[in-house]
Image (cartoon, rainbow, N blue to C red):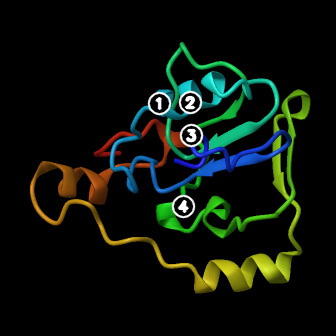
Amino acid sequence: AAVVSGKIKEGDCVVIRYEGPKGGPGMREMLGVTGAIVGAGLAEKVALITDGRFSGATHGHVVGHIAPEAAVGGPIAAIRDGDAILIDPAKRRLDLDVPADEMRRRLAATKAPPARYKTGAMAKYAKLVSSASRGAVTGE
């Protein structure tokens, strides 16, 4: 919505969280958002980071599969509007420029949204699935 409404500007970093294996659950595709960014002419002017996933059709400054994901208290959950996010692909680094004590405060105060599924297969999956960094599999 922020991309389509013109709220995203050159130099911004769009953050989409709670779309990882547990939070999604299931790592939904982010192609709709990247398509909106491209359509707005911002593909090479903004970054997009997420604990969700991308398809091979995605291009631009994107970082996905962030782990640990927001739903389990990963640092992506602590990002606030205006924070500096440093992306260095050559060094394989993604850093949030926030002091450690502030990160601890933010993470302690952060509450994940309620589970999308309370019963059924998706609820079981969300409970059992591993991190994206471990393959987002169940039954390890």
Among the 4 quarters of the image, the one containing residue 84: bottom right
Residue in view at x 47 percent, y 56 percent? 18
Can you identify the residue that label 4 sits on? 70
Can you identify the residue that label 1 sits on? 32
Q: Nearer the viewer, residue 4 or 102?
A: 4
Residue in view at x 67 percent, y 63 percent? 75
Secondary structure at badge 3 equals loop
Identity of the amino acid at label 3? Answer: Val
Separation of residues labelled 1 and 2 (CA atoms): 6 Å
Q: Position of residue 129 (x, y in %)?
A: 34, 49
Separation of residues labelled 3 and 1 (CA atoms): 11 Å
Can you identify the residue that label 2 sits on? 36
Identity of the amino acid at label 1? Answer: Gly
CB under 8 Å between callouts 3 and 2?
Answer: yes
Q: Nearer the viewer, residue 125 or 99?
A: 99
Identity of the amino acid at label 4? Answer: Ala
Q: Nearer the viewer, residue 5 or 48?
A: 5
Work out whether mark 4 precedes mark 1 in sequence or the reverse, and give the earlier one: 1
Q: Position of residue 111 (x, y in %)?
A: 49, 78
10 Å crowding of disc 3: few (<14), some (14-19), many (20+): few
Can you identify the residue that label 3 sits on? 4
Q: Nearer the viewer, mark 3 or mark 1?
A: 3
CB under 8 Å between callouts 4 and 1?
Answer: no
